[in-house]
């Protein structure tokens, strides 16, 4: 049992790490881990599930999900999980990843909503977390100018209640380092008028009640189509799993994330109006952060919204909740096992005026107070083909569309192709479509990828992505283009040993750094080479070694290099209350341009993507102790020790000396 748990934990870690490289450093992945952890405790019944539910298992491709329902439709309900081997696209690695999260047993949970059932069968999950950097940074000194007004402590309280697949409720309260705990916390909306912490999120959801499939009051996300028209919350992008560019749209979902930007707040519902036809409607009111300025007419204006959620300095506090956003809209969807089509639209309004910034590349940015978006999406499975796409229009502005296909070429080879075209004046505040840039605008591209499994021990992933930016961008004063290539080879001779090689190359264009009579673009090339092995010894110890080398070159300037080598040791003995892991790493990068990111183990529902920049040593240790049957405690200590420097960090985060260390403590009580 403990060994199975360890393998499942490693699966969750591998999934998260595979996508982390293409996400911002502070991206909150707790939503993904929350889903997988919940399904490990309450597995999905494959005979009673839906495509929306299976899409939350992010390692399943849309073609695999469609083939599963087609098999059940033709042959009846599954009798044994081993029957999955007879379904097209379900290879052995996929089935092994799937097994911890699914079942064929009828649920033993009562699902009738009564006070007695809610009290007796409900699942309560309470987490409290504390953390801080131990060294004092410049922002906490008595500076005459900008400084952090709060304390360096970080706090999190997260309570989650679930009852079968019928009721969900949650409360999340968080304070970031540098923020006040109680003092001067502006209310975020009429839903949460309190001043308890800097950030508070909550929801109550009732699911599967007659024709009402979902009703959510509070914070929620909407995820439809290929993320061009309406998508908030977590979204995949390019990763070694080449099918990741195909969005897994799960519709309306309650939000439990600590991300302070990527959600809606208000009320939403999904109703089944006729057979195979659902209608989702929503309304949201939020206050967002922005730096305001005054135009010649005396009206307050802004150019961009601040998405960090940080409120530490006087300016950040002044900008907090300075803009009101109201959004309402709906989705009409028709779904069968093979076909899924939908039309959607929403209207966004603000109480402040958007004015594009002064730079030439900002000429086509959104201007005004009102924006209406409409779109249509589709997916269709025909034999071994899965077609998908979406068309979106910002009224009185630009157009965007994406189309592609996922195809099973044989029992061992699958491919995906995708074409995208996002016009430079396509405006949408809920657009997270697959793109090279951080926003899916001003971009054309073509993506092609292959998954090859020549045997149960070998797997190969390759993809190529060519992209063009028709208009100017930040630090790019002309139309530009580039490409990205990735190849990965994995060898798994047994369940206890895995070896992997990866090569990734990316070329973009950027303004030259040279002092020249006229500005021009230089090619910027970045290549990553990675070798990694993982193995298990006995029933208690697991090991992971990685060597990664980065080569960076801009224009005709000589290449610079960076490298990272680390050793991980995991200790998870059978029937023991104690488990933990450590890492020792050495890194040496020539500059920030050749930096390396690596996923780091942390306490449950917290994620660290280590930034290895400069020269030095990195180490951390995590310890988990089971105090009681329903009570777990985590602790973490991490340290960077840099060489040949007198300070660590920059700006208000600058620390005197060569060391930066942090601690984290967490308690989880399930009842």
Image: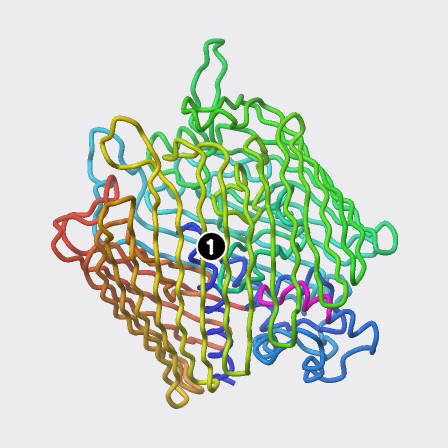
- Number of residue marks: 1
- Residue 492, given in percent of the width and then of the height, sits at 46, 82
- Residue 344, given in percent of the width and then of the height, sits at 73, 41
Query: Along the line of sight, which residue is nearer the eye, 419 or 5?
Result: 419
Q: Quadrant of the C terminus?
A: bottom right
State which quadrant residue 22 falls in: bottom left
State which quadrant residue 183 falls in: top left
Left or right: 446 as drawn, with respect to 608 = right
- Residue 542, given in percent of the width and then of the height, sits at 37, 81
Q: State yes or no: residue 59 in magenta.
A: yes
Left or right: 70 as drawn, with respect to 663 = right
The residue wearing badge 1 is: 157
Query: Along the line of sight, which residue is nearer the eye, 364 or 661?
Result: 364
Q: Which residues are magenta?
A: 58-67
Residue appearing at x 55%, y 76% in the figure:
453
Left or right: 149 as drawn, with respect to 405 = left
């Amino acid at each position: 049992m403990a060994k199975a748990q360890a393998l499942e934990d490693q699966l969750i870690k591998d999934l998260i790490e595979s996508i982390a490289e293409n996400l911002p450093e502070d991206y909150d992945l707790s939503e993904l881990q929350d889903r997988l952890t919940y399904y490990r405790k309450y597995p999905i019944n494959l005979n009673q599930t839906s495509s929306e539910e299976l899409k939350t298992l992010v390692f399943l491709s849309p073609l695999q999900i469609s083939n599963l329902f087609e098999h059940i439709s033709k042959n009846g309900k599954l009798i044994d999980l081993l029957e999955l081997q007879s379904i097209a696209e379900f290879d052995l690695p996929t089935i092994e990843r799937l097994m911890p999260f699914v079942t064929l047993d009828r649920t033993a949970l009562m699902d009738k909503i009564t006070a007695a059932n809610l009290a007796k069968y409900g699942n309560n999950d309470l987490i409290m977390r504390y953390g801080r950097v131990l060294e004092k940074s410049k922002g906490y000194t008595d500076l005459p100018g900008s400084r952090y007004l709060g304390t360096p402590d970080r706090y999190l309280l997260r309570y989650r209640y679930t009852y079968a697949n019928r009721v969900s409720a949650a409360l999340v309260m968080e304070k970031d380092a540098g923020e006040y705990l109680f003092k001067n916390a502006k209310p975020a909306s009429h839903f949460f008028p309190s001043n308890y912490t800097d950030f508070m999120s909550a929801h109550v959801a009732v699911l599967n009640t007659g024709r009402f499939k979902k009703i959510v009051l509070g914070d929620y996300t909407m995820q439809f189509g290929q993320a061009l028209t309406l998508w908030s919350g977590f979204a995949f992008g390019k990763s070694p799993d080449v099918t990741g560019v195909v969005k897994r749209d799960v519709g309306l979902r309650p939000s439990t994330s600590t991300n302070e930007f990527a959600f809606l707040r208000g009320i939403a519902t999904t109703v089944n109006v006729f057979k195979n036809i659902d209608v989702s409607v929503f309304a949201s009111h939020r206050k967002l952060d922005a730096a305001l300025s005054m135009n010649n007419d005396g009206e307050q204006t802004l150019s961009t919204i601040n998405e960090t959620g940080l409120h530490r300095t006087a300016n950040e506090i002044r900008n907090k909740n300075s803009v009101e956003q109201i959004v309402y809209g709906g989705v009409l969807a028709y779904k069968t096992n093979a076909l899924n089509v939908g039309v959607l639209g929403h209207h966004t309004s603000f109480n402040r005026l958007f004015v594009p910034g002064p730079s030439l590349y900002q000429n086509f940015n959104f201007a005004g107070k009102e924006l209406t978006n409409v779109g249509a999406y589709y997916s269709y499975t025909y034999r071994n083909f899965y077609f998908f796409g979406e068309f979106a229009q910002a009224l009185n502005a630009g157009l965007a569309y994406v189309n592609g296909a996922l195809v099973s070429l044989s029992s061992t080879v699958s491919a995906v192709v995708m074409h995208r075209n996002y016009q430079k004046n396509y405006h949408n505040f809920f657009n997270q479509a697959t793109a090279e840039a951080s926003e899916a605008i001003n971009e054309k591209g073509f993506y092609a990828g292959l998954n090859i499994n020549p045997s149960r021990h070998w797997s190969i992933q390759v993809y190529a992505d060519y992209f063009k930016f028709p208009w100017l961008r930040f630090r790019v004063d002309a139309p530009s283009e580039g490409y990205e290539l990735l190849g990965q080879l994995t060898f798994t001779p047994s369940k206890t040993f895995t070896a992997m090689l990866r090569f990734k190359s990316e070329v973009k264009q950027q303004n030259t750094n040279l002092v020249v009579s006229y500005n021009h673009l230089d090619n910027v090339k970045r290549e990553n080479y990675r070798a990694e092995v993982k193995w298990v010894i006995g029933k208690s110890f697991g090991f992971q070694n990685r060597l990664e080398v980065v080569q960076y070159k801009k224009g005709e300037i000589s290449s610079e290099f960076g490298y990272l080598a680390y050793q991980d040791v995991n200790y998870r003995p059978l029937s023991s209350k104690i488990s933990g892991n450590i890492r020792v790493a050495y890194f040496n990068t020539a500059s920030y341009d050749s930096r390396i990111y690596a996923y780091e183990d942390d306490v449950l529902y917290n994620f660290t993507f280590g930034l290895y920049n400069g020269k030095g040593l990195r180490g951390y240790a995590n310890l988990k102790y089971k105090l009681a049957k329903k009570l777990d405690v985590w602790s973490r200590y991490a340290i960077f020790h840099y060489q040949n420097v007198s300070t660590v960090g920059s700006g208000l985060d600058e620390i005197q000396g060569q060391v930066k260390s942090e601690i984290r403590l967490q308690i989880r009580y399930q009842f």
